[in-house]
Image (tube, rainbow, N blue to C red):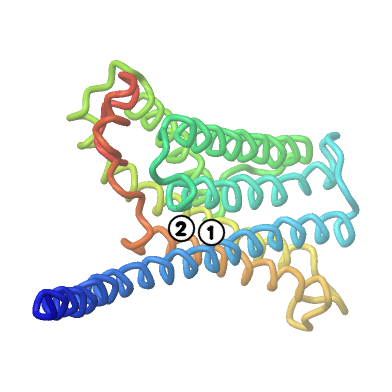
Amino acid sequence: MSHRNTAECGSETSAAPEKHEVRAENNPTFLSRMRSIVSFYICYMLCLGLGLACVVCVCVWNSQWRGGFAWDGSALQFNWHPVLMVTGLVVLYGNGAVLYRVPLTWGQNKLPWKLLHATLMFLALVLSIVGLCAVFGFHNAKSIANLYSLHSWIGIAAVALFAIQWVVGMAGFLLPCSPISLRALLKPVHVWMGGSILWLSIAACISGINEKLFFVLTGTQAYTNLPSEALLGNSLGVLIVAFGLVVLMILSNHKWQRPDSSPEVLAYTPILQEENE
């Protein structure tokens, strides 16, 4: 009997280290995953903060230093242009691009998030088009030539590619009749084009800020003297670059990519019968 008790005690004693070993194997994976998620949310909050700072900065610049807003062909109509382009083509666009990286969206039906992604991008595109209408209307009212500067060429290219990207993305990834093979073919192009459009948008905004400051700052308030308006404009450019870098860092980190959807989710409805985007 004592031998049996000893054997049982021995088995219990030997079982304990096995449980300990299992926990030791799982802990590093869990901790690594948690560190990755915490790191993502830190970067994501930084992205949101920089985006908000960009919008506030461009609004303050054009309301306090440039006289406010109107839609009457005057310089006040032009002030809508930088506000709408920064808000739409950079901030909304960037936040729409990183939507799938948010861990909250993982393991769920992807359709609502696809629709939200498409909606954010559509709003960004609409704001960008209205921003172009504002500057073209101002130029036409003042008999100023259109599309003569490098800034305007880059900006038009960014908006045109953005419009094509949205239409192709809608047709390729949301229409039920779109085959899986087409989606697999479009996915890398869609991802690459998305990052390229963001870089073009940032380049257009920075060159536009610089161009505007050279035009409006003269005399004692010349750009070379760095008056307060110049400091604000330069700061806006730095914020836009920082925002873009954070967005691209989020997009380029493979640990923050959305995991593959489960077969059940893929078979839920024809619109979701696709590979992970």
Q: Camera-side residue: 238 or 118?
A: 118
**What residue appears at the point 59 percent right and 47 percent down from the top-left corner?**
92
Label 2 close to label 1 by CB (< 8 Å): yes
Within the image, what quadrant is residue 268 found in? Answer: top left
Amino acid of disc 2: Trp
How many C-alpha atoms fall within 10 Å of the one at disc 1: few (<14), some, or many (≥20)? many
| Distance CA(mark 2)–CA(mark 1) | 5 Å
How many marks the image carries: the answer is: 2
Taking the image as shown, residue 264 lies to the left or right of residue 111, namely left
Task: Give the quarter of the figure containing the C terminus.
Answer: top left
Q: Which residue lies under the disc numbered 1?
A: 202
Residue lying at the far bottom of the rendered structure? 225
Q: Residue 137, percent across and down?
A: 73, 35
How many C-alpha atoms fall within 10 Å of the one at disc 2: few (<14), some, or many (≥20)? some
Taking the image as shown, residue 232 lies to the left or right of residue 14, namely right
Q: Residue 208, percent across and down?
A: 63, 58
**What residue appears at the point 87 percent right and 62 percent down from the top-left corner?**
65
**What residue appears at the point 47 percent right and 70 percent down from the top-left corner?**
39
Q: Which residue lies under the disc numbered 2?
A: 199
Taking the image as shown, residue 71 lies to the left or right of residue 94, namely right
Q: Camera-side residue: 146 or 270?
A: 270
Residue lying at the far front of the rendered structure? 1
Q: Camera-side residue: 84 or 145?
A: 84
Placement of 128 over or under 172, stated as above or below:
below
Q: Camera-side residue: 181 or 133?
A: 181
Amino acid of disc 1: Ile
Placement of 222 over or under 71, stated as above or below:
below
**What residue appears at the point 64 percent right and 58 percent down from the top-left corner?**
51
Q: Residue 96, percent across and down?
A: 52, 45
Regarding mark 2 in the picture, which secondary structure is present there? Answer: helix
Q: Residue 136, percent across and down?
A: 67, 38
Within the image, what quadrant is residue 46 found in? Answer: bottom right
